[in-house]
Amino acid sequence: MKLFAAPLNLPLSEPFVTARGPRTEAHNVAVRVEHEGVVGVGEAAPIARFSQTQQGALEALHGVVLEAPADLAALERQLDALAPRFVGQEAALCALDIALHDWLGRARAAPLWRLFGLQPTRVRTSMTVSLQSPSSAAARAAQLGERFALLKVKLGGSQDEALIEAVRARCPEAGLRADANEGWTNPNHALAMMAALAAARFELVEQPLPAGQWHFARRLEHRAPLPMFADEDLAGALDAEKLSCLAGCYHGVNVKLDKVGGLLPARRWIAAARAQQLSVMVGCMASSSLAIAAAAQIAPLCDVVDLDGSLLLARDPFEGLEIEGDEIVLADRPGHGVTAVLADAVEIR
Amino acid sequence: MKLFAAPLNLPLSEPFVTARGPRTEAHNVAVRVEHEGVVGVGEAAPIARFSQTQQGALEALHGVVLEAPADLAALERQLDALAPRFVGQEAALCALDIALHDWLGRARAAPLWRLFGLQPTRVRTSMTVSLQSPSSAAARAAQLGERFALLKVKLGGSQDEALIEAVRARCPEAGLRADANEGWTNPNHALAMMAALAAARFELVEQPLPAGQWHFARRLEHRAPLPMFADEDLAGALDAEKLSCLAGCYHGVNVKLDKVGGLLPARRWIAAARAQQLSVMVGCMASSSLAIAAAAQIAPLCDVVDLDGSLLLARDPFEGLEIEGDEIVLADRPGHGVTAVLADAVEIR
C-alpha cells in the first residue's frame, strides 16, 4: 500500500480567537493511501497546545509501512501496531487512521458509518463565536443565529460575565455552550463564571480550568451549576488512569480525532466514556471538510456535535461533505465521502 | 417490543470440574424479543461465583420495557439506560443484550459480525480438559487432541505439577493453555506452578491468584514466565479503575459476555484493553450454541478464542452454529445465526 503525505495550509475566513490568542491559518497535514486503484484520504491538525507541529507530523509519517486492511479488525491490529511510534504525534496518526478507514470503506463500497453499524442520519452542529468584546460577540452570535440553532461561545477573556449576558440577551432562544479553553486559572473565578453561565441558560462549559488540575476540577465538578466537559484534559490514546480521572472530575468529554489519533481511538474513548456514564461531545479543530466528514461518521454515537471546522475556512479544498443549514448529512457515499484532491502530495516512501 | 424469558437448563455430557468443584448441569436463562414479526434470541449463564442465580436473573428481567432499535447507536443508548438496573445481574443483561443485537441483525438482514465491521471468517477454539488426576487428564487431553489443536487445562488441584507434565508428555504438539480458576492462594506456589507451565510450553495461564489480590498479582506479573490472563478479576461493565488495575497486573484479559453484560460491554472492554496493550481472550460459560454463536461474532477482535461451551452439553437445544473440526464458522446468516427454539418461553410483560 502506497502512502503519501503533504502539508495542508488553510486560510481562515476571519481570525479565530480563543483564550490562547488569535489564528488566521490552520497548518494541517493530509495523507493519501493507495492500493489496487483504491484511494483513501485523511487529514488532521497538529495541535500546538500539545507541542505538535506540521513539520513534526509529516516527519512522523516517514518510513511507515502499511498493508491494505481486510476489515475493521485487521485495520485495528495494524493501527495498534503503529500507535507506539506516534505517541505525542497523535495528529499524524489521526490523518493516517482516517485515510486507512476511508480506503477500507471505499474498497468495500460502504460508508464508514455503515462499517460502524450506524444508520444514515443528520447531525446538528454548533458554530463557534470567537472570543471578542461583549457587544461584538453578541452581534456575531445574532448573525450566526440566523443559520445555527446551537452556538459555542469562546470565553476566558477579561469581560466574560458581560459577554455571557450580552450574547444571551441578543439570542434569547439559541442553544448556547461555552468554552473557556483553560482560561479560568482561579477555581473561585471559574465557579463565578459557571454561575453566570447557568443563569444565562448555557448548556455546558468546556475546560473551565487549566488541564491537569484534577484536584481543583474534582472539587469544582461537585459544585458546578452546569455540566463541565473536558477538552484539553483529554488527549492521546484511551488510558485507564486518565479515564478514571476524567470520570471523577467531569460530566462529559470532548473527543476530537486530532487529539486522540483518529477514528479507532476516538471510538474507544467514546465507548469507555459511555461506560463511565460520561456524556460525549465530538469536536474538531479548524480543518477542511475532509477531517469534518471523518468525524461526522461517529457523530451519531455522541450527545453533542461541534463540527464547524470547515465553516471557518476562507475556502475548502475538498468536496463531498453535505451540510444543509446547520445539519451535517451522513450520506450514502463510500468511506467518509469526501473527494481526494491532493495534487501536490509528496510521496514519502 | 415484546420480551419473553425462560430458564434454560442444560445437562452436560460429563461433569465439568474446576478448582471450584464439579457441575453436571448449566442453569442458564434465555430471552426472546419480538417486534413486527422479527424475533431475536439471547442466552446467558448466571454465575454463582458472582452471587448470581437463574431465578435472580429471571426476576431482574421483569418489567423491562424495550423499544426496537434503529441501529447500533440506538441499541447502545437503550442498553446504557438499562444497565444501572442490572448491576450485579450482568447475566440477565447479557441475555437481553444478545437478543436485542440478534433482533437488529435480523431486522437489517445482516450478520452481527458485519454490523461490527468485520469479515466472514473462521476462528479456532480451544477445548477444556476438566480438573482430574494427572493420568486421567493426560488421557482425556490425548483424546480431545485428535479434534482440537488447542487445549485448555483446568488446574488448581493438589497434583498440578504432575498434571502439567503428564498432559504435555501425552500431547507433545498441542497448543496448551492453563486455567487455575483462583486455585493458587499462595503467590509463591503460583510462581512455582507458572514455572512448571512455562517449562511445559504452556502459552498462558488464567487467573492464577484469587480475584482482587491486585498487590500480589502485580508482583507476580513482573516475574511471570508466561502470560497471565485475568478471568474472575474482570466482571461487570467497563470500569476505568478496574481497567487500570488489570493493565498493571496482567498480560491479558478473558472477556466473557456473561460476566460483563453482553456484546456491547464486551466490545467496550475489548477496545479499552487493546488501548492498554492487553491481549484479549473471548471466553464462555457452559451454554448452548446460542450464547456461543453470539460470542463468536466478536471473536475476530480477540487474540485467543475459548468458545467450547456448547461442546460440553449432552444435547444442544439450538441450531445454526457451524463448527467444523475445532473451528467456528462466522457464517453469512442474519443476527448471530442461531435459530430460536423457545417453545416453553414465559411472557414476562
Image: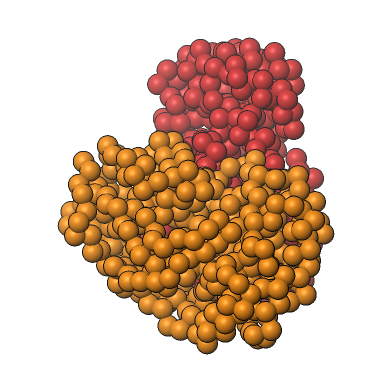
Chain colours: A orange, B red
Q: Tally the numbered discs.
A: 0
Q: Residue at x 44, y 45 (%)?
A: A52
Q: Is residue A292 above or below residue B36?
A: above
- Viewer-side residue, A144 vs B232: A144
Q: Residue at x 79, y 45 (%)?
A: B51
- Percent of width and height locating residue B92: 70, 57
Q: Quadrant of the C terminus of chain A?
A: top left
Q: Quadrant of residue A157?
A: bottom right
- Percent of width and height locating residue B240: 66, 45
- Percent of width and height locating residue B83: 70, 60
Horizontally, is A338 left or right of A220 in the view? Answer: left
Q: Say whether residue A325 is visible.
A: yes
Horizontally, is B154 left or right of A95 in the view? Answer: right
Q: Quadrant of residue A279?
A: bottom right
Q: Residue at x 28, y 43 (%)?
A: A66
Q: Is residue A173 above or below residue A233?
A: below
Q: Is residue A287 above or below residue B11?
A: below
- Viewer-side residue, B106 vs A85: A85
Q: Is residue A104 above or below residue A79?
A: below
Q: Say whether residue B340 is visible.
A: no
- Viewer-side residue, A314 vs A258: A314
Q: Residue at x 34, y 44 (%)?
A: A55
- Percent of width and height locating residue A79: 40, 44
Q: Residue furthest right?
A: A223
Horizontally, is A318 left or right of A223 in the view? Answer: left
